[in-house]
Each structure stands twice: as structure tokens, then as C-alpha cells.
Amino acid sequence: MTADALTLGMPFVLARATSGRAPKKPMDEAKFEAFYRKTARPIWSYIFRMTGNAATADDLLQKTFFRFLRSNPSIADEDHLRRYVFKTATNLVFDHFRESKRDRERILDPKGPSNSDDLRHDMMRAFAELKPQERALLWLAHVEGSSHEEIADALGVKTKSIKVMLFRARKRLAGILTKRGLAPEPRHA
Amino acid sequence: MPETDPFEREVDAWMKRFAALEQSPRLPDPNSLWVKAKLMQSAAAAERASLPITRVQVAAYLVVASGWAALVTWKWNALSAWINSFTPTHIIMGAAGEQTAHSLSLTFIMALVVLASVTVMLAFHTILAEE
């Protein structure tokens, strides 16, 4: 097990695992609030784009931070904590899909789109055609700007596989966009 | 798979547009999340602490139930005769001085008293623990 894997699995041992220094104090309420204000919105967006349901995103966001706090985090490296939270959110989303087994049907908000939301609706539909893992891959890579290693950590796959998985996911999304007429106009040189 | 991904630029642009779509989540208050998480941690700790007690309680229920089953099986004939003796006829005959009621052995009565006491204590413990 690498130090990174250790830190992702147990953020509270981060300081000792990576630097050999004495473990820092557990995160207090003020630090948690600061961390939450920075990360909650991106996490919510990630969960919402993955599930397509705002209520589910609200619920899973809360669960993500409950799990985070239960792990008794200590602030050593905010980036690691952020990765831990994304990994937790990913696991919860995948668990949610496994539990419901109806992700394709439940992907869109039950309220349905209004006319003004047509574009959003089309984009959500197109994204929903991807498999959950492909959605996570593309979101983490293109929106969060995560490295292959970070994506591999979040999804629990080998880093080496990410390049191929990303290629396939992009190809599939491009195909879906073309089929739905959502692909951008080709640029002329 | 080609060295350069021909879909990367197209997908990247689309994903950025997708991510930029207007959305206004009502995020929960971090303080309430903190308090809830602490409460959940306390509840989980209490549950962990009471786990051995719960296990002993379940074992006690099983022991008491087995005790009653064994006692009733052991002296079923005497017990059923004793219960059947509580008819109006037998009571009147008993009042008239006739020896009609079946008697139970002292050992059995002692075992009955002990088991009944344990059952009552266990019931009280369960009720008080619930409260």
C-alpha cells in the first residue's frame, strides 16, 4: 500500500504516513467550515451531474461529509482531503446506482424540464447515456482537472487504465453528441 | 488507440459548457452538518458500548425461555393434573375437606419460583433499559 493510498483511505493518519511527524490535531469546526465552503459546491455539481437528480445530490452530499467527518480528518494537505471527499462521493454515487439499479430511468429530475431548460435537458440526457463510470471519468478529468492518478484513486482502478478508459469515454460521448446533434460545428482552418 | 485523442478537444469544450450550466444548489449549513455528524458519532459510540450488554440480554432471554421449556416438559403430567384440579367441583370438594388437589413437589415449586423471579427481573431490566 502506498502512502497515497493510505492517506486516501484514512485522512487522519496523513501526517504520520507521509512525513513521519506527530499527527496533527483533528479538524475543528472552523476548519471544517472553511473546507466545506471550498469543496461543497464542486462536490454537489459532480454528484448532480452523475445522478441527474438534485434531491439525490443533496442527500449524497450530506452523506459524503458525514463520512468525511466520521473519518476524523486532520488538516495536513487540503488537496488530499479534497481527493478523499471526491473518492467518497464517487463511492456513494456508485452505491446509489447499485441500490436503485435504475440509473438510466432515474437520471433526470422527476419534475422534468421547462422550455427554458431545453439545452440543459439535452445535455443532461446526453450525459446520462454514458455509464456511471464514464461520467465520473469525464467529469473528474475535464471539469475538476484531476490527474490520471487522482481519477484512478477516486474510481478504484489502475492508473495505467485511465488513458484507455478516458479515450473510450470521450469517443462514446462524441458519438452520442453527434447522434443527438449536440456536437459543436467543426472548425475550419 | 491513437497517440493523440481526436475527441479530447471536442469533449473538453462540451464538458466545460455542461459544467457551466446554471445551477443553484441549496447547500446545507456546515454548522448543522458538523453538529449532526458529532451526534451520529456519539450515537454510534453508545451503540458500540452497549453491544455486549445487548448480547448478554439476548442470551438471558434464550436461557430463560429454555428454562421454562425444560421445566414444563419435565413435570408436564403433574402440572397438567394440578391445573385441571382447579375446577369448581374440585374446589367445592376441597372446601368440604376432601383431599382432591394434586400436589407439586417442593423442588418443582422452588424451580418455578426461581425461574419466575429471573423472568420478572429480566422484564424489568428490559423495560428500564428501553426507557
Image (cartoon, coloured by chain):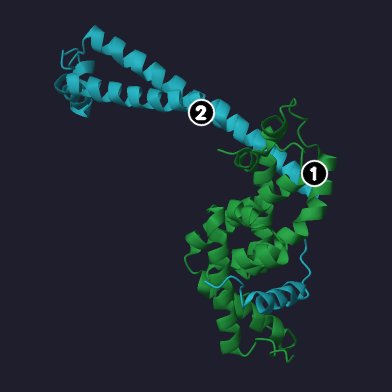
Subunit that carries the residue with mark 1: A
**What is the quadrant of residue B28 in the picture?**
bottom right
Q: Nearer the viewer, residue A121 or A18?
A: A18
Number of the label disc, if any, that sits on residue A130: none
| Circle 1 or circle 2, nearest the eye | 1
Q: Position of residue B42 (x, y in %)?
A: 66, 33
* Element carrying mark 1: helix
The chain in green:
A
B10 lies above or below B106: below
Residue A73 lies left or right of residue A179; in this view the side is right
> Which residue is at 69% across, 74% downward?
B12
Picture mark count: 2
Q: Please tell me whether mark 2 sits on a helix, a strand or a loop.
A: helix
The cyan-tinted chain is: B
Q: Alpha carbon of mark 1 to alpha carbon of mark 2: how far?
A: 31 Å
Q: Position of residue A137 (x, y in %)?
A: 60, 64
Q: Residue at x 74, y 25 (%)?
A: A22
Task: Give the answer, above or below, for where A148 lies relative to B115.
Answer: below
- Residue B115 is left or right of residue A60, and the answer is left
Q: Are marks 1 and 2 in contact (CB under 8 Å)?
A: no
Check residue A32 in the rendering and tell me which mark sits there, or answer none.
Answer: 1
Query: Local crowd at mark 1 within 10 Å, few (<14), some, or many (≥20)?
Result: many
Give the residue at mark 2: B51
Q: Residue at x 47, y 65 (%)?
A: A101
Kind of residue at badge 1: Phe
- The reply to whether residue B58 is visible in this rendering is yes
Q: Position of residue B50 (x, y in %)?
A: 55, 27
